[in-house]
Each structure stands twice: as structure tokens, then as C-alpha cells.
Image (cartoon, rainbow, N blue to C red):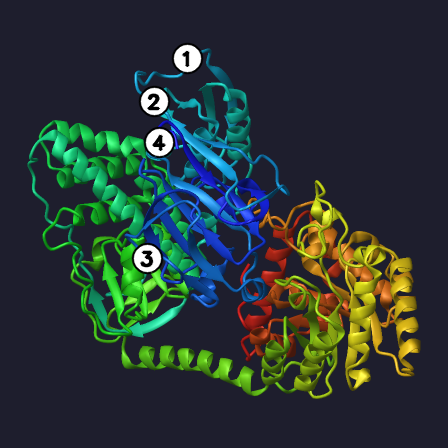
Amino acid sequence: MSSSQLTLVAPATGIVTLLSDVPDPVFADGTLGEGIALDPLEATLHAPCDGEIVQCARTRHALSLRSEQGVEVLLHLGLDTVELQGQGIDLLVEVGQGVKAGEPLCRFDPELLAEQASSLITPLVVTDDAGWRLRLEASATGERVERGETLMSLTPAVTSGETATERTGPWCERRATLALESGLHARPAARLRAIVRRHDVDMQLVHGGTEARGDSVSALMNLGLAAGSEVVLQSRGDAAESALDAVVELLTTPEGVESPNAEADAPLAPTSVADGDIAGLVASPGLAIGPLATVSLPLPAVPHDGRGATIEREELLGALKRVGRSLDSAREEAERRGQRAEADIFEAHLAWLDDPGLLEAATARIEAGRSAGQAWREALDDEAEQLRATGNALLAGRVADLRDLQRHVMAEFAEAGMAPVPDIPEGAVLVADDLSPSQFVDLVERAPAGLCLKGGGTTSHVAILARARGIPCLVAMGEALEGVTGEHAVLDAREGRLEPTPDASRLASVRDALRHDAERREAERAEAFEPAITCDGREVEVAANIGDSDEARLAAESGADGVGLMRSEFLFLGRDAAPDEAEQCREYQASLTALGGKPVIIRTLDIGADKQLPYLRLPEVPNPALGVRGVRLWHDQPALLDTQLRALLGVVPLDALRIMVPMVSEVGELAWVHERLEAVAAERGIAERPRLGAMVEVPSAALCAASLADQADFLSIGTNDLTQYALAMDREDPRLAARADVLHPGVLRLIQATVQGAAGRCPVGVCGAAAGDPLAASLLVAMGVDELSVEPARVAAVKASIRRLDAASLARELPDLLAMPDATSVRRRLTALHESVSDTTTTTPERIPS
């Protein structure tokens, strides 16, 4: 290998996927770095280059190696594999081990991973380029590569004999008005920086006479850009125009991640409180009782003066790299636990840690004689003051994140390291000036009952984490918290106050409320096997969505009235050939047996261009969601359908079986499957027939529901796809996730058309995510839906909410709801209706979030 080039080869034979096409924003957005991905066709991953193993995830799903040039490469086996906790994966190397290109790194069970992970797509990402520039050799998704073929090459950004020069050429300029509801905060700033790096350009943003480099997250945030701010974008380099296009799109597209009205919608502190009580802003609602425990975490002590600029610079760079690895490990652990909010925050911290503006500020102080630790402390002190000075509440709320980075890096230079987490009793209400996200994560292991902060804001990362964990939290409480004590304090994070010394009557009242909530949850579980009948006498079936026979048993134990959706595709994934008739029949029979005669709806194979099978490779198409999938597949692969139908017809009792056909767009498709079912049954000499139904996932099926209902024994609305197709919004696009709402009036009209078209002909169920959304579920029942199918864990709560629902009363609101302009209006109106019912009934319904 030439010393002027580093080649990264394919770690396995597989199908190329561009990183931007990976269905996971952490990789697709380039936040972790540039790279490529493979859908592996063999069960071993090999080293993409010579190097040293520098990181192996505890859950064995990811590892990193560093080449002799200092380039670090991450191999991440599959997507969401962290949740497997190492099952099906065997590491063949360990940290510190040297490897040669092509040597095996890990083996895995492709069948297990295909069944339990969301995808086998394996990203190969350059997380630290060490100043080298990357070029992709494979250029198209769908290309097959053999193990050892070149995927990427890197060359030094500055080769020997050259000097680093600024890019030349004319500056290209654009103007943009910010549409980011929460302004240019950490996450979009990190994405902007990634765009600049990907396009290899110089970029600066100008606002109000202030300039910021496009590759500096802190400089970008310090511009103080809010929604509606106008900004001038300037870029130069070979890809200047493309970079500007991408940045303009980023800045002018609403995020759909954080609520645009998070501050406005949050309950304000009460205007007055009783003597001795302390007011605050509600960051996470709830109610708690516990002893007050003050938490004080001082910064680590570090030397003030340095030992020379060269030494201290190297020390700082080393510390930043070590902290980066620690944060990355924390992010992976959060993902493993399913704590997505925490993982996103650690991701933003990683981007900030790599900020050149912060590094430059610290380096200047090192040059002035400070130690690395002291230089970092002073640089981040100044940065925090600048954030506060913007006057932007969201940016000021990020000061705690800066303090987090400050503390972590300073600990690298302190003899005692990080200050230990204080010893606090379980169930305490914690009191602190402010907390950083990592401090919160450490403290939450002590199971606090609640949290009170002098500072902070309702959109701070700690507030987000508290809401995600369901921990009551008040912020912005001020100096009134200083020295507060109490053995049995009441934290009322509904009304926005802390009561340090409540009287006996108040304590009894709060304990009654907490006990009532616990009893309600227990009562819901106890009544899970009873029918769900609305206040006005309508019975609604509550079934379960499952993936296999194990989940079928869980559904039966959860009180489900049946199975509303069994996804049969898990049987077909992660293998070299389709399952035969006998294997399929055994799995289907196990699910029917588990439900003891209750109806079980099994969906025929729903596979297509977006979910490929190695033995059924379909042509790649520009838009897989509109390609050959669901029932459309059977015209090309009739043998697969016939085998599945024979397996389904082999179960007993057949009167408990329901067969559901996905992606039906017209009645002729269902009629064709019906003919195949009749033919297979006749061949087997079977006189009895299971019921045959269709999924309503595309607008044409909803609008032609009457015709479908004449042919079908039942209809089931797949609200996820129906919403996607009705609104022309890719449900996998994180930028559109918040807007792709089933309560959009256009989607509701399609659901109404389905129910009305099927009326008197066949029952209608809902098996999409909307069935488990309390607001949406109540409206679906009011619209006339006969069945809701949810995850097994939600069955008891959904049944209980139906029993509290006056469907007829809500149905009278339908004309007004359908006439509303957008989903947000519908949600607000439904929330108000539910709260008004809550105020006038003695049985408090489950609070339904908006």
C-alpha cells in the first residue's frame, strides 16, 4: 500500500448501500462521519484495512480499528443490533490487537439478526479521518461487491511538499430565512457542519454583522438564529453550489423534532404560591413525595499554569479524543436500553466536542501559558456566557450541555478525576443549581422521585430526559431553592410548585392521588380479559399485533381478544431459501393454539423492493414504497403465495384463521388471491375456508372500500402506510415524522370513507400505530371502527380507555374535526374534549397527551 493512500476494502461480500440511503438518521445524516454500507451475504465480517482494534462494543455489534495513519473506522453490524445484547454475535478480536486487511473480526448468526434486528445493513464509517480525504469507489446502491474489493480510498489532505492553503475561487452567496422552529441549536448546527465537511467547502454564515464558520458548531449557535431570522450563506470550493443547496434545505425545512411551541405550551409557574412554597416552570409533569436532597457537583480541580504550549496542546487533543470515545460509548449504551432521547443528546455533544471554534479558543489560552485543563475551563466559561447573552431561551438552556463537556474534559487532567456521584437516598426529590445530561443519567440510577433546578429551561436536554423517563421536574426556580430542606416534600409538577413542608392533610391527599394512579394501572391489568364496551354500549375488540408464536402467547396472557396482525415475513428473512410449507404451518399453528380459538389474522408475505430477500432479489426502483410489494409480488412469484396458502390451510381450527392481503389497491387484486385460495383448497380437498380480508393502506383502497367490502370478509386499516401515501411523506424520514400524523383531516376522511364503505358489508379494524395512540384510538372508535390491534403491552390500557369513552358523543364532533385545517388543530380539539370529560366525571380518564 502506498504511504500516500489508504484503501478500505469490503469486509464481506454484499450489496452496497450508500450511507445516505441507510434507514437510520444517525448514519444517513453523516453525523458519525463519511462512509458506505453493505447488506452482507456472508456471516463473517473482516478487517477493511491493516490496523489496531481500538474499540469493541460490550454488546459486540460494533467495533473500531485505527490504521497506522491514524484513520479510525467503525464497523456497525446491522441496525438496532445493540438491543440484542450480543446474542448471535461472536467477536474474534479484542481491543489492542493488531489485524491485517481481510482477517476475520466477528461472526454472526444472520437468521437470528434478520429476525430480531431491523436490518442487516452494516455501515462502514470513517469516524476520524486524521486529516485524510475520503473518496468512495462504490458509487451506487444495489451494486454487488466481493469481500476484499475496494470500497473507499483516502489520501492526505496535505501531502508532503505542499502547504495547507485556503480554498480559492469566488464566493457563492445565498440568503435564507430560518424555518427551524427552535432556531439553529446544537443538532441542526451539527448537521450543517456535516454538510460542509461532506462537500469539502469553505462556508460562513453572516447575520446582523456577525460571521460564523460553517464548520464550527459553537460559532453557528452563537449567531443566535431563531425561527424567522434571515441569514446570508457564503461558500466556495468545487461543490459550493451543492453545499449551499443542502444547507438552505436544512435551514428552511421545519425540524419536526422538538415542539415549535415547547416554551409557549409548557405550563408556566403559578403567579403566586403559598408561603413557604417555591414556584417553578414545569419541565416534566407529574407528582412526587420525598425527602429533599441537595446535589452539588463542583468542577474537577486542574493545574492553572501549563508546562509549555506544545505539551499542553498534545494533552488537550488526547483528552478530547478520550472523552469522545466515552461519549460514544454512552450513546451506544443509551441506544441499547432504548433511550433514544439520551442517545440523541450524546450525539449532539460529540459534535460539539469536535468543534474547531472551541478548540481554537482553548489553544489561544494554552499559548498564553494556561494548562490544558484550565484553558478548556476558561474557553467554555466564555462560550457559556455568549450563549446566555443571545437572549434565546433555547440556546441558554444548552449551557448545561457545555458544562457537561467542560467537566468531562477537565476530569482528564484532575488527579481525582470526575467528582463522585453524591450518595442520595432512593425516592428523594433532588435539588440542584442545574444538571448536565450526563449528571442526570448518573443520578437517575438512584431512582429519584423528582427534580428541582434553580436554572435550566423547559427545552433543555435535562428537561427532555426527564420527560422521557417520566420523572417530575421543575426548572427556573431561582435562589429560593438555596438551603431548602424537607423530610416529606411535595413536588407538584402539574401546578408548578415545590412544597417543602406540606401539612398532614396535603400529604394524605397527594398520597391518595399517587395510590389512585397505581391502583388504576393495576385495575386495568385485572380487567384486561373483560370485553371493552364504551359508555354508550358499543363493544370494540382489542387485539394484538405480533411477529411470531412467542408474541402470540404474550398476547394471550395480556388479555387480547385475538391477533389483529401477525407479520409473516419474519419467517422469510435471514435465510438462503424460503421456508417450506411444513415450517410455516408449524409456526402459524403455534400462534392459533396460543390464542385458544380466538381469531388470528395472519398477513401474507409483505416484502418488496424496500425489504429484499437474498433468494428473491427484485430490481431496484427509485421509490421502493411505490414499487412491487405486498399483493403485487404474487403476480411475479405465484409459487411463494401458493406455498404460504397451503401452509395456512393446514392449521386448525380454520374458523379461527383470518388471512389478510397487504397493499391492495383495487378489488381485482383481492379477487385474484381469492381464486388462488379456492384452487389450493380444492387441490387439498378442504371444504372449509378461512376468512379472507384486505389491508387498506393506499388511498384508492379507502375510496373504493365498498367494492372491496363486497369481496372481503373484513378490512384492516394500516394507518402507517395510509398516512404516508395520503400525505406524500416518507414515514422513514425523521424530518417529516412529526408531520406525518394520522389525525390529519385528509387521512381521517380516508378512514371515514373506509368505514362508511364497509358499513353493513364487513367489519373494519385498525392495526397501525394509531390504534395505540389514545387520542387517535378514541376517534377511530367514534368513527365506527370495530377492532383496534395494538402491541400486547398496550392491550389493558386501551381496553380501559375504551370503557371510559362516550363514542356517540365524540361522533357528534366529527363534522367539525374533519373540517379543521391540520392535524395539530385536531389534536388540540380532541385533547380539550377529553379534558372536559375528565373535569365532569368521577372516574378520571387516562390523560391523553397532545
Estimate how packed mark 1 is, as few (under 14), some (14 to 19) or many (20 or more) residues with alpha carbons within 10 Å.
few
Which of pointers 2 and 3 indicates the residue nearer the eye?
3
What residue is drawn where x is 41% and y is 82%? 515
What residue is drawn where x is 41% and y is 66%? 470
Instruction: Give whichever of discs 1 and 3 has the lower sequence position.
Output: 3
Residue assigned mark 1: 168
Residue assigned mark 3: 94
Residue assigned mark 2: 158
Contact check, label 1 and label 3, Cβ < 8 Å: no
Provide the secondary structure element on which disc 3 rests.
Answer: loop
Question: Looking at the rendering, in which quadrant would you find the N terminus?
Answer: top left
Instruction: Give whichever of discs 1 and 4 has the lower sequence position.
Output: 1
418 and 289: which one is in front? Answer: 418
What residue is drawn where x is 61% and y is 82%? 553
Which amino acid type is shown beneath numbered disc 2?
Val
Q: Could you tell me residue 627's position as x and y percent?
A: 75, 48
Which of pointers 1 and 3 indicates the residue nearer the eye?
3
Judge from the rendering whether residue 75 lies leftward or rightward of residue 777; answer left or right.
Answer: left
Instruction: Give whichever of discs 2 and 1 has the lower sequence position.
Output: 2
Asked where in the image residue 562 lies, by quadrant, the reply is bottom right
Estimate how packed mark 3 is, as few (under 14), some (14 to 19) or many (20 or more) residues with alpha carbons within 10 Å.
some
Residue assigned mark 4: 216
